Image (cartoon, grey):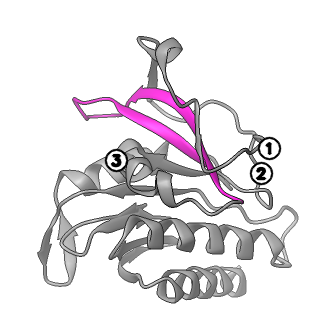
Amino acid sequence: MKRVLSRHDKILRTAIEANGGWVFKTASDAFCAAFDTAMDGLKAAVSAQLAIRTESWDLPDPLQVRMALHTGEAEERDRDYYGPALNRIARLESIGHGGQTLISLVTAEFVRDMLPEDISLRDLGDYRLKDLTRPETVFQLIHPGLPSEFPPPLGRASKLLLHSQNRKYPQLSRGLKSSSAFYSAPRNVWGQI
């Protein structure tokens, strides 16, 4: 297992750093990274998920990693970040499934007009996340090389059914497509893996 975790860490660090990000915290197998832009965070998440999916793991089942992207302000202290944006991404990441990348509404708004042709965002609806007063509109990253079908979000998230019928963009994308814990602070985008 030590070799598997070492390879997992190398894949994540490589994807984060290759896309202009930096890891500011690790805990066990979790990584927290920051990026200058939301698109850099999204590219890192896609790169990491694809690398993990195609890696040959010496395990009975393939390794799957859940990820989340959120953009917001945070306070930097001692090479770490603090604040509500980090609480939100931690809650967002906690409701994901292995192999799934979830994205907050604010991050979706930053990237939606710049999405590469092979990436789209599926609107999963509004959720109340544990200990947060404001609900979050949750999107799932869709890429042809990654799984796209997952069970409902995990944990204590509860779906709000209010205005989901009136949404203009059930799937944010650029062009026509078929459906098949990063953060942002002073240097703007956050991720949690």
User: How many marks do you count on the picture?
Assistant: 3
Residue 3 magenta-highlighted: no
Residue type indicated by callout 1: Ser
| Distance from the alpha carbon under mark 3 to that under mark 1 | 23 Å
Could one spot residue 96 in this view of the protein?
A: no
Categorize mark 3 by other alpha carbons within 10 Å: few (<14), some (14-19), many (20+).
some
The residue to which callout 1 is attached is 180
Q: Is residue 32 above or below residue 65?
A: below
| Distance from the alpha carbon under mark 1 to that under mark 2 | 8 Å
Cβ atoms at labels 2 and 3 below 8 Å apart = no
Q: Toward which corner of the image does residue 187 lie, by quadrant?
A: bottom left
Residue at 57%, 79% (x, y): give it: 12
The residue to which callout 2 is attached is 147
**Magenta extent:** 118-141
Residue 132 magenta-highlighted: yes
Of 108 and 114, which appears nearest the observer?
A: 114
Residue type indicated by callout 2: Pro
- The disc placed on residue 98 is none
**Residue 100 at x, y percent in the picture:** 63, 51
The residue to which callout 3 is attached is 106
Residue at 27%, 57% (x, y): give it: 86
**Image depth: mark 2 or mark 3 in front:** 3
- Lower position in the chain sequence, tag 2 or tag 3: 3
| Distance from the alpha carbon under mark 2 to that under mark 3 | 23 Å
For label 2, the SS is loop
Q: Is residue 144 above or below residue 40?
A: above
Residue at 69%, 33% (x, y): give it: 151
- Lower position in the chain sequence, tag 1 or tag 2: 2
**Residue 164 at x, y percent in the picture:** 49, 17
Residue type indicated by callout 3: Val
- Lower position in the chain sequence, tag 3 or tag 1: 3
